[in-house]
Amino acid sequence: MPGADAWRAARATVAGLPRTEIITETDNYLHAECRSAFFGFTDDLEFHLRPSEGLIAIRSAARLGYGDLGVNRKRLDHLRTLLQKQSIVR
């Protein structure tokens, strides 16, 4: 999938995540805040489009504390699965 199409599809996927709000968006960067269901903790989710490398770098991290009980890893795995189903990532 060409970079611009992949970027639009990735953005739409993030926008469809529960308890997630897109905060900042440019042509090659997206920052969203994800809130936990039970305690309302905020995690940061970032996407960076790198067309020269043919990839979208993704980061998900907790704002508070040192441990997140694997929530951010699960979020990234879930995103990867959703994007694979759309043939955005391999």
Image (tube, grey):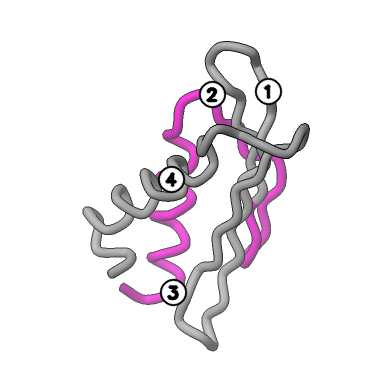
Dot 1 amino acid type: Phe
Local packing at callout 2 (Cα closer than 10 Å; few below 14, some 14-19, many 20+) is: few
- Residue marked by disc 3: 3
Tell me if residue 14 is in the magenta stretch.
yes
Where is residue 72 drawn, in percent x and y? 54, 42
Mark 3, secondary structure of its residue: helix
Report the residue at 44% width, 74% height from top: 3
Dot 4 amino acid type: Ala
Q: Give residue 12's mark.
A: 4
Report the residue at 46% width, 49% height from top: 76
Q: Which quarter of the rendered picture does the C terminus lie within?
A: bottom left
Q: Which residues are magenta?
A: 1-30
Dot in front, 2 or 3: 2
Report the residue at 36% width, 54% height from top: 80
Residue nearer the viewer, 34 or 14? 34
Q: Disc 1 and disc 3: Cα gap in Å?
A: 32 Å
- Residue marked by disc 2: 19
Q: Disc 1 and disc 4: Cα gap in Å?
A: 23 Å
Dot in front, 1 or 2: 1
Mark 1, secondary structure of its residue: loop
